[in-house]
Amino acid sequence: MTSHGGNQMTAKYDYDVLYLGAGHGTFDGAVPLAQKGFKIGVVEADKMGGTCPNWGCNAKIALDAPVLIRHQQQNMSDLFEGELPKVNWKNNMKHKHDVIDALPDMIEGLVQSVGIDVIHGFGQLKDSHTVQVNGEEKTAEKIVIATGLHPHKLMVDGHELAHDSQEFLALDELPEDITIIGSGYIGMEFASIAQAAGANVTVMMSHGIVLRNFYQPYVTLIVDQMKKDGIQFIENANVSAFEQTTSGYVVKYGDNQEHATKWILDATGRTPNVENMGLEEVGVEYDQTGIKVNGYLQTSVDSIYASGDVISSSQPKLTPTAAFESAYLTQLFSRETSKEIDFPAVASVTFTTPRIAQVGVSVDEAKDNPDYRVVESDLAQTNWYYQAFKEPIAKRSLVFDQNNQLVGATEVSQKADDVINALVPIIELKPTKEQMGRMIHLFPSIASDVFSSL
């Protein structure tokens, strides 16, 4: 195995480590590495911070915040007077900009404050230690590729008429009718946001499954609620073309069927940013799922590593995963560890209404393995805390091993993200019964309620 530690600026290279991309796969590790005395450079072709703060998590949650409140008010409508308000799209979009617009400059200021060079431009690998940016060559002992993902485009006739998630998150005017192609987390979350703001929403599924990585009986509850809210679902749509008309657009699908709409969102997935970077020329192995790495996040070229969503990995492609990988590389390069990366339990969530979240051993995996025991609770029917908020949908499945240790959890409810967050340290750190007894939470609160069930 090639040595991974840095030499802290040998005269041979411009940098000890040069990162391509400025998202969480970079700055969560680059900043502490620079603070340890390493000479660091970061190459970014677009906004600092990458997808998450600009066109992903932060932007989405800012838009979703009033959607959550609206659904809570809808659940408790008999306790209010007056009509249920819809989300004001223009004001909500302004709110989103108020929340996120300062983030790129803030992130750039953060990395520069510890002596990191920020190089704006598109980086191309020239050899195992050289990156060309804006016609200039920058060299480094180690290079980290952290270029993330971009929206996938469904290549059908008229594909240029469809819009992607980044464009949805920047809409000044919300179209009165939106058709979403795809039923993954982006399609489902944006369907919830658009419907709450008054749009007619149709979700066209490429198959019969929604949110395929989540427990399907719980997903069905979400879909049923979205249908009650007026969102239309078309299963196995088999979209074949998009066409423009005098009044909008037509989506052609199925057996010569047509669906008229005012705006088309292509939410058919995300694709690794690996094109035109010189990977083939330098010998970095990759495929359509991303860059191949070993247990040290090292590519097929010894001096080149990868971090974040661009990696071909079974780990969830999430911001916390990228941050963990970036932090690991800091430990590796500074010789604080010589071990392969050891991933903790990684929680995931879809911010639909209601939410669905999970961590650890899945319910499906547990039900197929006699070594696990699944305890399912219908919280909407039995739990006073959920009943206080009149949640119509609230179910939780806990997975225990033969030692009665909690190893997995899945929940569907408006509080699912908070519940799963509370359970992550229990699954990861495996406290003893005595240690659990010393955890006293605020009461009443969702955390105290969750722990009372363990």
Image (spheres, rainbow, N blue to C red):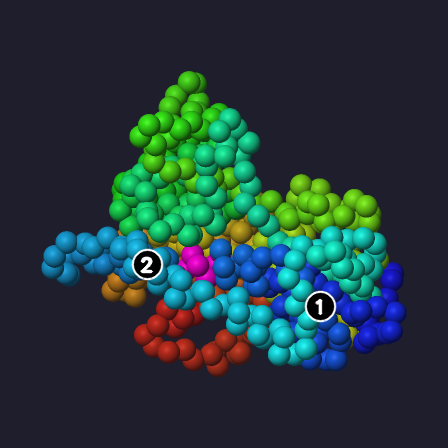
Say whether residue 421 is left or right of residue 84: right
Tell me where residue 325 appears, x and y as whole percent: 66, 63
Please tell me whether residue 426 belongs to the stretch shown in magenta.
no
Tell me where residue 260 appears, x and y as whole percent: 34, 29
Task: Look at 72% across and 49% down and name the residue there.
Answer: 277
Task: Look at 35% across and 72% down and name the residue there.
Answer: 445
Checking the image for residue 92, the label placed there is: 2
Residue 128, image quadrant = bottom right
Residue placed most toward the observer, 205 or 45: 45
Residue named by callout 1: 41
Label pair 1/2, CB-CB below 8 angstroms = no
Task: Look at 44% across and 28% down and name the residue there.
Answer: 242
Checking the image for residue 281, the label placed there is: none
List the single residue furthest toward the top. Answer: 256
Q: Which residues are magenta?
A: 56-62
State which tag comes first along the sequence, 1 or 2: 1
Please tell me whether residue 58 belongs to the stretch shown in magenta.
yes
SS state under label 1: strand
Q: CA distance from mark 1 to mark 2?
A: 36 Å
Say whether residue 379 is left or right of residue 346: left
Can residue 380 be seen from the camera position used here?
A: no
Residue 44, image quadrant = bottom right
The amino acid type, in three-letter code, at marker 2 is Asn
Say whether residue 290 is left or right of residue 445: right
What secondary structure do most residues of the magenta stretch adopt? helix
The amino acid type, in three-letter code, at marker 1 is Gly
